[in-house]
Image: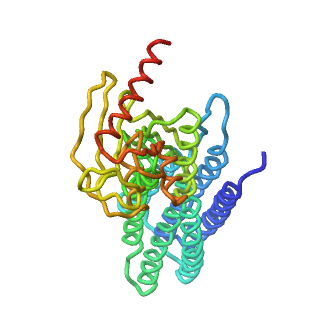
Amino acid sequence: MEKSNNQTAKERWALGSLILNSTLTVLKFIFAVFTGSLALMAEAVHSFSDLVASVVSLISVKLSAKKSSEYPYGLYKLENIASVVISFFLFFAAYEILREAFFSEREREIQHTELAIIVMIVAMISTFVYSRFELKAAKKLNSPALLADAQHIWADFMSSVVVIAGLIGTYMGYDLDRYAAAVVSLFVFYSGWEIFSSGMKVLLDVSLEKEEMEKIKKIIYSHPAVVDIKHIRGRVAGSFKFLDIELLLHNFSLRETHRIVDEIEKKIKEEIPNIDSVFIHYEPVRQKGLRIAFLVDENRSIKDFRTASQIVIVDISDEGKIQVNNPLEVQPDEKETGDILSKINVDIVVSANHPEEFEVRWKLARAGVMVWETEERDFEKALNEIVRSYNEFNKKVKEK
């Protein structure tokens, strides 16, 4: 199967990081031995941990896209496992630096300091440029492994700055080499902690960011068929996000409900990046009884969508019990009235005429609302007309 553009880009960045860290590790180690600089040797150890981390990152990026019958949801979390592994290499590097700086009994004499400075300047420039570009790519591709690697290389850049300062001090006659190495360890440890905590959150199925969850809720509520969200859960695995949603929908046929759910899922995937799957469970808001909206004026005379100033909601139970609710005041405007009716969970709208505008008719149809056009102008008579028809329908259903 052909690789996606995102997957190919991830692998290229991971490979580039591997090449960069391999080069820097060899370069720093050679000149650390040649010059005798503890800070430069610490940097070589740091770069070696970067190198191992890059190997882990490249392997994880390649494996994370694989799916099989055993792992139907993919191996996305391998990226996060890789991030945690990378953090341990950082902790190890920090320990090595501190141990060499303060607990080693070996005396070190730094030679050819100017060469060490040149090497570190080359390392500083290369790590700065690569980490900035890789960080940008990691955010675009939403890859935690690349993000961890970019932060790792950035820590290498920061430590390079400190080492250069220490080497310049040493060149000027001050014994700053071991202290520069100690400061490097703090950068390394901090970077490792950030990566470790981020990776562990995902491995423990941390929820999506609050802002992203709110955006998803707005997308769902924008659909006129949705009455309410009973619950919504989201989690992250590697670069990808998974959603579990339970909705209350207006009463529809099974075929229409499937279409609505597909529309909601499609819109979420279009507006939220890196959604792997959206599982939506739905149920009708009411399974029994009937809710009717009557379009009336202040005198309870039946009106149409353009002239009604009130909406009277009537609930009828299966046993025939009738409850007339307090009227809802509306502006005599067809679109506004239609918009309200598509969102207040009614089964039937009783009106003097059908709405004229297609947009209004379409919204009502999508919300599963039937328009009942009546010639009656008296509210009580129109209500009796509906009740009579509803009772006859229930009677036929029971006889079957």
Residue sitting farthest toward the bottom: 172
Q: Is residue 129 left or right of residue 199?
A: right
Give percent across and percent down for residue 263.
56, 48
Rendering coords of residue 396 (x, y %): 47, 18
Q: Is residue 370 above or below residue 301?
A: above
Q: Residue at x 24, y 39 (%)?
A: 324
- On screen, residue 204 above or below 275: above
Q: Of 175 and 305, which appears nearest the observer?
A: 305
Q: Is residue 91 visible?
A: no
Name the residue furthest top.
399
The relative height of residue 336 versus residue 174 in the rendered view (above or below) is above
Picture quarter with the N terminus: top right
The reply, left or right, for residue 253 in relation to residue 328 is: right
Residue at x 26% of width, y 27% of height: 321
**In the picture, residue 69 is in which quadrant?**
top right
Residue drawn at x 30%, y 25% as measured from the top left: 320
Residue 368 in picture, x, y percent from top left: 48, 42
Task: Give how far across and how far down residue 201 sits, in percent.
Answer: 40, 46
Q: Is residue 161 something that shows in the picture?
A: yes
Residue at point 47%, 12% (across, down): 399
Q: Is residue 94 left or right of residue 384?
A: right
Q: Quadrant of residue 230?
A: top left
